[in-house]
């Protein structure tokens, strides 16, 4: 069980502060994306839950808590076919599935997808994707 929190206040937090937060949150339910408040020395300290695994979760003594100072973006995708390869490039990344090429932007949104009867390879450059298919064909894609 893991919990990533971002403080929504300005203060330098001392080492081991995660242990204090864990004790204050024990037994509470938290979800990814919500804002929670932790009472400490008579003050309410707000935190954004950047990631909770699982979500929702009940915080207990075994919950691993990390406090981050920068925003974190996480998304998870599931496909019907096995993933053969993932190739990052400047505009996003290419997912190669069984005979299919799927190009996604950095936010995980589909830019392009196509199935190929004879997919022989995929290459990426700084700004584009090359698909090698058939006996002697190339397809260039620039998102």
Image (cartoon, rainbow, N blue to C red):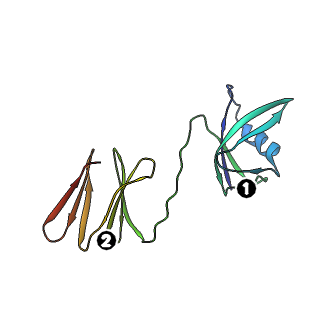
Camera-near label (1 vs 2) is 2
> Left or right of 98: which side holds 129?
left
Q: Is residue 75 above or below residue 45?
A: below
Residue at 65% across / 49% down in the picture? 32
Q: Residues within 10 Å of mark 2 (few under 14, many from 20)?
A: some
**Outermost residue to the right:** 42
Which of the marked residues, 1 or 2, is nearer the chain's N terminus?
A: 1
Disc number for residue 57: 1
User: What is the total number of numbered labels drawn onto the structure image?
Assistant: 2
Q: Residues within 10 Å of mark 1 (few under 14, many from 20)?
A: some
Q: Quadrant of the N terminus?
A: bottom right
Spot occupied by residue 16 in the image (x, y as percentages of width and height) = 73, 38
Query: SS at mark 2?
Result: loop
Residue at 57% across / 35% down in the picture? 70
Disc number for residue 13: none
> Left or right of 73: which side holds 89?
left
> Left or right of 14: which side holds 124?
left
Residue at 70% across / 30% down in the picture? 13
44 or 69: which is nearer to us?
A: 44
Spot occupied by residue 60 in the image (x, y as percentages of width and height) = 78, 53
Q: Estimate the spatial distance between the alpha carbons at disc 1 and disc 2, rounded to whole Å.
A: 38 Å
**Outermost residue to the left:** 136
Query: SS at mark 1?
Result: strand
Disc 1 to disc 2: CB gap under 8 Å: no
Spot occupied by residue 12 in the image (x, y as percentages of width and height) = 67, 27
61 or 26: which is nearer to us?
A: 26
Residue on which disc 2 sits: 99
Q: Quadrant of residue 119?
A: bottom left
Q: Is residue 98 above or below residue 94?
A: below
> Left or right of 55: which side holds 21?
right
């Amino acid at each position: 069980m893991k919990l990533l929190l971002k403080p929504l206040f300005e203060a330098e937090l001392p080492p081991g502060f995660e242990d204090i937060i864990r004790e204050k949150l024990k037994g509470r339910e938290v979800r990814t994306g919500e804002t929670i408040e932790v009472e400490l020395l008579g003050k309410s300290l707000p935190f954004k839950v950047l990631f909770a695994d699982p979500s929702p979760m009940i915080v207990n003594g075994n919950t691993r808590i990390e406090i981050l100072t920068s925003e974190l973006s996480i998304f998870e995708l599931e496909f019907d076919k096995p993933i053969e390869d993932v190739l990052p490039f400047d505009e996003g990344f290419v997912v190669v599935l069984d005979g299919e090429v799927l190009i996604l932007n950095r936010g995980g949104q589909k830019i392009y997808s196509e199935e190929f009867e004879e997919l022989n390879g995929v290459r990426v450059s700084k700004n584009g994707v090359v698909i090698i298919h058939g006996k002697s064909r190339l397809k260039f894609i620039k998102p």
